Amino acid sequence: MTALDPHDTDTHSHIVRLSELSSERELRIGVAESLTSGMLADTIGAGEGASGWFAGGIVAYFTDVKERVLGLTPGTDPCSAACAEQLAAGARTLFDVDLAVSTTGVGGPEPQGGHPAGTVYLGWATADDVGHRRLALVGDPEEVLAATVDAAISLLAFHAEGLRPAGPRRGREDLGEDPRTT
């Protein structure tokens, strides 16, 4: 698999916008990945000033890991809106962020679990909202993953438009620090 080019026109413009919004609004961003297996975190981490706003990402392929670490309800279809939303909510809690996004689905080339190749769910979670977006992508697995990463970054930028930071973070106040000044 080739790495996603963070300078691809669409991906680059989305990551620039996400970086600007996150920096200006002092937002913290996190991700949970199954389908994209780290590609999303890698691309976001290459964004301008990411060390100031990208809290991190987790790759959880096994369902039991999704359940234990991210709070996925046992029995949830791993290629579903419910899974995407729960993974995003779990990442938001795990990383103590303002906005989290998740990727799950079937990259292909074959169908899996009754879902056609290219069936993708992106989840998002903020303090006030949890939701999902379903994608039906066409292409080989590399193309599906690249399109998923681009769509996830676009979704992050879209939701970051309406956010303000949640305030002091857990752990930082224990140190007597205001996270917006350190």
Image: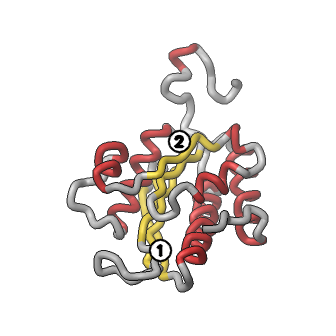
Q: CA distance from mark 1 to mark 2?
A: 27 Å
Is residue 26 or residue 116 the one in the foreground? 116
Three-letter amino acid code at disc 2?
Val
* Residue highlighted by disc 1: 107
Q: Give the residue at the far front of this rendering.
A: 1
2 sits left or right of 171 in the view: right
Is residue 109 or residue 68 the one in the foreground? 109
Q: Are marks 1 and 2 in contact (CB under 8 Å)?
A: no
Is residue 87 or residue 22 the one in the foreground? 87
39 sits left or right of 121 in the view: right
Task: Pinpoint residue 47: horizontal percent, then vertical percent.
Answer: 73, 51
114 sits left or right of 156 in the view: left
Q: In which image quadrant can residue 85 be found? A: bottom left
Task: Pinpoint residue 143: horizontal percent, then vertical percent.
Answer: 60, 77
Around disc 1, counting alpha carbons within 10 Å, would you say few (fewer than 14), some (14 to 19), or many (20 or more)? many
Which type of secondary structure does the marked residue at label 1 adopt? Answer: loop
Q: Which mark is residue 97?
A: 2
Please tell me whether mark 1 or mark 2 is closer to you in this view: 1
Three-letter amino acid code at disc 1?
Gly
